[in-house]
Image: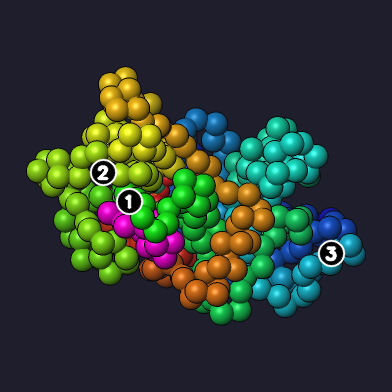
């Protein structure tokens, strides 16, 4: 049995998003059904729906920063009750049996995690549909708890922008005595700045937007460098332990490699559609690392949410109606979002 559900979808790489009726399965024994209150707007939604990475299967219903209320639970669900606040991030399932799943790295599941949208759905044989919709059904093992101290709308982007910056900052040891760069002040970047500052690092934001300098400092950066300023970039040469690159479009990686110390790491989380070039000299003189990171596992996501609840860390958002999504995407593409759009899903129901 299924439940008819209102959604917003892209039906071609170029068509504006518009309303679409989808079906959600009725909860299986270990499933949680959630009425979606808020869904964040990630740049990955745009890359996917516009088929910039390849592999889009239409219709695409994007959205993987989901917070809502539990409306039904399966008979074997133990951790959620009807009425609870709950969240779903970038994944809805994995094999639960491979080494990576055993280590809490479900995003690297050997059989392939089931991502929240545009991912083969074992339940339907079609593709998964994301959070630009009224409700979602998710196995409880991939459903997160939202601390009561957090505003649900301002918590939603933690489910992707939050964990995607938290995980590498923890892994590469952002903390006291470390100099950490964050490249790009968008959805991911603004959480990267907040987290790196809270972890105790010396934080430098790199932005292409001079108009974001004051916000960068307000959000926690000790220094803000406008990356087109060659002199300001040169002053930072050879000084970073880690730089987290959140940029969604073509840009020079070599320019950031020059800023790393010996054994420093440039960690990519942004996914520009075209391959990026890098000079071998950037890696070998002096010895430096180029790496990447993909979201974070389920337990790590819960840990991040709980930490945000305990420390009052939330996202800076612009709340929009579902029917404002196309204008919001246009603004994301112009790097003009302060600093995450979140859809008020009540606007889809009314
Ligand atoms: P976003 O809000 O659009 O932020 C990207 C920022 O990059 C912009 O605000 C802008 O910051 C900067 N930028 C944009 N175009 C640029 C250009 N041509 N040159 C230099 N800087 C530019 O996007 P987001 O949602 O944070 O996502 C960022 C990227 O991460 C996307 O590619 C997304 O798909 C990817 N992502 C990856 C993961 C993962 O697990 N690895 C998870 C989520 C998202 P300034 O104005 O400050 O320059
Ligand atoms: Zn995302």
Image coords of residue 93 (percent x, y): 72, 47
Please say if 112 is above or below 197. Answer: above
Q: CA distance from mark 1 to mark 3?
A: 44 Å
Image coords of residue 98 (percent x, y): 76, 36
Q: Secondary structure at mark 2?
A: loop
Residue 150 falls in image quadrant: bottom right
Image coords of residue 209 (percent x, y): 20, 53
Nearest the viewer among 210 and 296 is 296
Please say if 251 is above or below 40. Answer: above
Residue 67 falls in image quadrant: bottom right
Marks 2,1: beta carbons within 8 A: yes
Density class for disc 2 (Cα within 10 Å; few <14, some 14-19, many ≥20) is some
* Image: magenta residue range: 190-204
- Say which residue label 3 marks: 77
- Say which residue label 1 marks: 179
Residue 302 falls in image quadrant: bottom right
- Say which residue label 2 marks: 239
Marks 1,3: beta carbons within 8 A: no
Q: Residue at x 17, y 50 (%)?
A: 226
Q: Nearer the viewer, mark 1 or mark 3?
A: 1
Image coords of residue 141 (percent x, y): 75, 56
């Amino acid at each position: 049995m299924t439940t008819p559900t209102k959604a917003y979808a892209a039906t071609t790489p170029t068509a504006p998003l518009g309303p679409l009726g989808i079906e959600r399965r009725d909860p299986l024994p270990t499933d949680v059904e959630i009425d979606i209150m808020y869904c964040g707007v990630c740049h990955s939604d745009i890359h996917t729906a516009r088929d910039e990475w390849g592999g889009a299967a239409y219709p695409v219903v994007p959205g993987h920063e989901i917070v809502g209320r539990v409306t039904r639970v399966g008979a074997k669900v133990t951790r959620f009750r009807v009425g609870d606040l709950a969240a779903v991030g970038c994944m809805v399932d994995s094999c639960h049996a491979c080494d990576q799943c055993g280590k809490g790295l479900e995003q690297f599941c050997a059989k392939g995690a089931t991502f929240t949208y545009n991912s083969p759905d074992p339940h339907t044989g079609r593709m998964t549909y994301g959070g630009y919709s009224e409700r979602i059904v998710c196995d409880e093992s991939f459903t997160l708890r939202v601390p009561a101290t957090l505003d649900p709308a301002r918590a939603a982007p933690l489910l992707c922008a939050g964990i995607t910056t938290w995980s590498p900052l923890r892994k590469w040891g952002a903390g006291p005595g470390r100099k950490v760069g964050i490249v790009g002040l968008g959805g991911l970047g603004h959480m990267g700045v907040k987290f790196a500052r809270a972890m105790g690092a010396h934080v430098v934001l790199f932005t292409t937007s001079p108009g974001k300098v004051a916000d960068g400092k307000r959000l926690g950066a000790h220094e803000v460098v406008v990356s087109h300023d060659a002199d300001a970039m040169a002053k930072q040469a050879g000084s970073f332990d880690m730089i987290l690159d959140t940029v969604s479009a073509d840009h020079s990686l070599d320019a950031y490699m020059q800023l790393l110390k010996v054994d420093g790491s440039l960690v990519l989380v942004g996914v520009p559609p075209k391959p990026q070039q890098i000079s071998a000299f950037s890696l070998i003189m002096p010895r430096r690392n180029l790496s990447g990171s993909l979201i974070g596992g389920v337990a790590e996501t819960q840990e991040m949410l709980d930490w945000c609840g305990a420390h009052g860390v939330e996202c800076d958002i612009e709340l929009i109606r579902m029917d404002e999504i196309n204008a919001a995407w246009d603004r994301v593409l112009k790097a003009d979002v302060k600093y995450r759009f979140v859809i008020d899903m009540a606007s889809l129901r009314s």
